[in-house]
Each structure stands twice: as structure tokens, then as C-alpha cells.
Image (cartoon, rainbow, N blue to C red):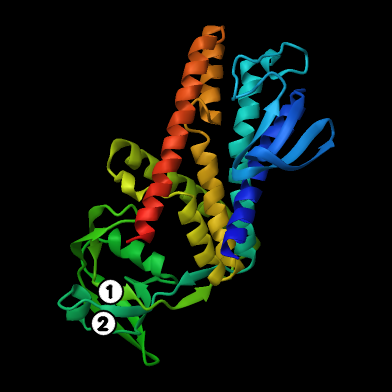
Amino acid sequence: MSFIISLLVLSALIFFHELGHYFAARAMGVYVEVFSIGFGKKIASFHKWGTEWKIALIPLGGYVRMKGQDDSDPSKKSYDNDSYNVKTPIQKIFILLAGPLANFALAFLLYFIIALGGPSILSPVIGNVVKDSPAFIAGLKSNDTIKSINSVEIFTWSDMAKHIETSTGSLDIEILRNNFIEHKLLTPKVTETTNMFNEIIQKKMIGIGSAGVTHKLELTPSETISYAIEQTVFASTMIFTGLKKLIVGEVPAKELGGVISIVKITSDAAAYGWMSVLAFAALISVNLGVLNLLPIPALDGGHIMFNLYEFIFRREASEAIVIKLTIAGWAILFSLMGLGIYNDINRLMG
């Protein structure tokens, strides 16, 4: 069941990405020959609006094949009026950007739906207290609820963590314990920990862990939109940062995940309900948008670079160079996919 859910999620995200390219191409007067979800042998297809719409055997991507544009053979070009090749570099860049932008728009929509349903978020309820930590010395205990820090009201665990991390000096922490309000005075301590990229960092902490208690956010219409925007921007920033760290070697290559990880995480998300599946789908949608903007010739970002070259120098890039770089781009992509699957298998085998 989890595999089917993962397949449906991936296919839907790919569909929206390619739909962005499709509508942008049609808007620019470019004839779209094929709209495919998946690669390889055709499983099913139909013809509508002059385009062949098909589902292929390997569901790890998709493509829109426009007249005069074929990644499998960059030398195939057409200079008819409805061809991709006769459009200006700006028009072609618009078509190329439309796919990733569709993924960002879809992520926003998914986060908006999550916001409407009342997203669950960690409450500032203390679980474990580290022995000899500032919290332990101040007398904080499990099941204490943090109500405010230095008179600033605290609603979520994230609010509390950010306030502690950016604080200066001592903190007056107001807690709710057994229906009574108490105040505890303590000073955060810079402690070694790991971040979301598994890097060791120094961070101000007080030595407490979450109890895992959650509550639903009640959002106004304007807060719902703000939530969707903030989550989309956060996801984009996180993925861009992760990619940068992976490229420069700050994050080891063994952290890269593949399709098996996607299936597993989708399965885990499904166990927590459809809201979790939507949140994961939004994150993967942003991931697709970001990855397709990378300047790798086989991706949208690579084609954008070729068109920027044409726009700046008023001539197309050499066909021989385009073909060589495209082959190199596919080699990079398949290598990354292989590495991701290899890491996934290693994780499964422990």
C-alpha cells in the first residue's frame, strides 16, 4: 500500500511539473508532441489537443517533448513557426522556469490545505530534563508547560527554542505545573549538538527535551496564507542549503537518499494520516522544483544556462558542446540516482 501511495504522490508531483511546461509552451505558441509521466516503454496513452498523453513503465520522472526540442537527441531541431527553436531565449527560459514554478505553487497549495485543516505542532511541554543542565539546576521538571520567557508568551516548542537560542543573559521562565504558575530563573549554556543536516554545531540550550505533546494551530485567513508562504520558503531554503552543503562536502554523500527513502518516508507519513502525507508531498514538490533549477544540462536549469548564453552572446551554443554536456548531465543524474539507491540499501541493511 505504501508503494502505491508513494507512486501516486510522485506521479502527481511530476504531472504538475510537466503541466507547468505544457501550459507555458502552449502560451508561447509551441506545439507539444508528447506529455509523458515516466520513461521507457509506453503503458497507456491517448491523444488530445494535438498531444500524445502517456504513462510509461519507469515512474521516476517525466517529460514534455516540444517540437524541435528532444533531450535524447539535441541535434533534432525544427525551425517551423510552432517550434521551440524559433522562440526567443526569454520565451524559452519562461517555458523552462514554468515547471519548477509549478512545483513551488503546488507546495504552497498543499501547505495552504494543511493550514486550513489545522496543522499539528509541538507544544512547549517538557519531557526529559538533562542532569546538571541549566534547566535541571533551576528545578524544571517533566510535564512542565512553558508559558512565557522574559514576559514573551510562548505557544509552540519552536517558539521556545528560537527564543532561547537568540537570548542574552538570564531568562525568567514562567511555567505551568499542576495548575499552578511558577517562575524559574536560569542562564542558557552553549552546548554541542547536531542540526538537521547531521552537522555538529554550538547552540544555546537549557537541557530539556520535548514530551511529544502536540496541539492544532488555529489560524485566521491571513495567517493561513502566511503559514503556507513561510513553509514553502522554509522548505526551499532548507533544500538549497542542503544541496550547497552536499556539493562543498560539509554534508557527506552517504546522507543522500533515493527513491527507496521516498517510499519509506511516505509510508511513515501515511501511518500518521493524510495531513502528514500532504506535508511530505509539499516538501518533495519543493525538492523537485529546486533540483530542476540546478545548472545540469539534462535538467531545466541546464537548458536555462544555454538560453542565457544565447541571450548574452546573441548566438546559440555549439551543437557539439550541447550534445556533450547533455550526455554528461545524464551521467551525473544517473550517478546521483544510483548513489541514492545505494545509500538507501545500506540504511536498510544497517
Q: Is residue 35 above or below residue 66?
A: below
Q: Position of residue 335 (x, y in %)?
A: 42, 36
Q: Position of residue 49 (x, y in %)?
A: 85, 33
241 vs 34, nearest the viewer: 34
Quarter of image, res 95: top right
Choose mark 1 or mark 2, whichever is in front: 1
For disc 2, the marked residue is: 140
Q: Quadrant of the C terminus?
A: bottom left
Q: Is residue 58 left or right of residue 236?
A: right
What residue is drawn where x is 49% and y is 50%? 259
What residue is drawn where x is 34% and y is 82%? 175
Q: Is residue 201 above or below residue 26?
A: below
Q: Position of residue 169 (x, y in %)?
A: 20, 64
What kind of residue is marked 1? Ile
Q: Is residue 307 left or right of residue 56?
A: left
What kind of residue is marked 2? Leu
For disc 1, the marked residue is: 208
